[in-house]
Image (cartoon, rainbow, N blue to C red):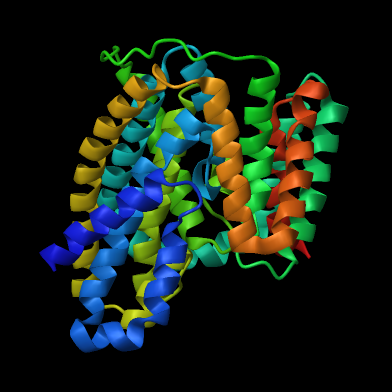
Amino acid sequence: MIGALFLGICAGIVTGLVPGVHVNMVSALLLSSSAWLLQVTDALTISVFIISMAVIHTFLDTIPSIYLGAPDAENILAALPGHKMLLEGRGYEAVKLTIIGSFGGLIIVIFLTPVLLVTMGWMQALLEPWIGWILAVLVMWMIIREKNKIAALFLFLFSGALGIFVLQTDMSQPLFPLLSGLFGVSGLISSLNENVTIPTQKIEDSPILVRPILKTTIVSSIIGAFAGFFPGLGPAQAAAVGSQFVKGNFLVLVGGLGTANMVTSLATLYTLDKARNGAIVAVREMTGTIGLHDLLVFLAVALTAGCAGVLLTMFFARRFAQLMEKVNYRKMCMSVIAFIVILVIIMCGWKGLIVLFASTCVGMLAPLINVGRSHAMGCLLVPVIGWFLL
């Protein structure tokens, strides 16, 4: 089992650092090979591998998001403030903030697990009928706070329509071209047009204000826990909701949401026998109904992987910061865009290429109409609100 934990950590490094290679993809491959795997090992060992990989991924996936502008579905909103800090020479600090959120969220949710096991069932029954309305009110509040309200509403609804269309296609990975265009390629193209250069990155440890970061970590843990057992809600949607409750430390929020959501999914599997993400679906298919012993093992694995995630993310963040000083930023942007295009073609074919082009155009609308690109989160929020209300 220790070997499975170590191999899962190694796999999480790959899925976290390589854009387009996701935990769900690896989990699906393992599930398709389960007949062979179960002849050489047991379901619990495979599950330990998957969980350690998934937890490490929630720590490391902010590095390509911040340094390369290539986010995945869980941390798309981290790409915006994170890349801005990179252009200020503070990319390492941006990653460190996400690590604080991730590890804090992990610890808080593990401590809250006994409470979740007792309350999860009745909370879902009580709140699920109102989730759609709650999200709709929060979206309206988010738009009202914008100076250009009409433009913000237009971008939200337009991206929402695009999201509904894309999610109805038969592509295997529809979110990859959609989110890469809205929050990745569009930002990289804007940087190319503005002839942005990357300043020397500061990697010395800067002072951390404990009180506001602790508040943000607690908020992210609570919201991430809710998203972990409500169907249709994930870290990306939770980030859009959570942004309405915190004024600063947004990167702490995003980091905490992803890890808290992942750990809460384990409690959801035990309590409700429901799988809320691809990794947990694979675990459920491998093990069936899990017992209390299995849950305790999984939580211990998550905590161990989280400790490793802190060290690994700090290590790679420093290496990336040093590397950024040596590369030509323009060539790097073009290389990342080309890499995303190639991945989209491989994973989604020509339909994915059309979605990538369309979503990139929509993402580039935000600076043109002078509203935040975060309103393009309508691509996920509109379908979720519609799913709850219709």
Measured as percent of width and height from the top left, residue 295 is found at 25, 68
Q: Nearer the viewer, residue 19 or 207?
A: 19
- The quadrant of the rendering that contains the N terminus is bottom left
Left or right relative to 232: residue 321? left
* Residue 84 visible, this orientation: yes
Coordinates of residue 298 in the picture (x, y in percent) = 24, 64
Q: Residue at x 37, y 27 (%)?
A: 97
Residue at 35% x, 73% y is 283
Position above or below: 26 against 244 = below
**As drawn, 119 above or below 320:** below
Q: Residue furthest left?
A: 2
Residue 45 position by quadrant? bottom left
User: In the figure, residue 182 lies in which quadrant?
Assistant: top right
Report x, y in % for residue 180. Answer: 62, 44
Q: Position of residue 159 (x, y in %)?
A: 77, 44
Quadrant, the C terminus? bottom right
**Number of numbered markers:** 0
Q: Is residue 41 left or right of residue 370?
A: left
Residue drawn at point x = 21 percent, y = 36 percent: 311
In the picture shown, does residue 123 fall above or below 196? below
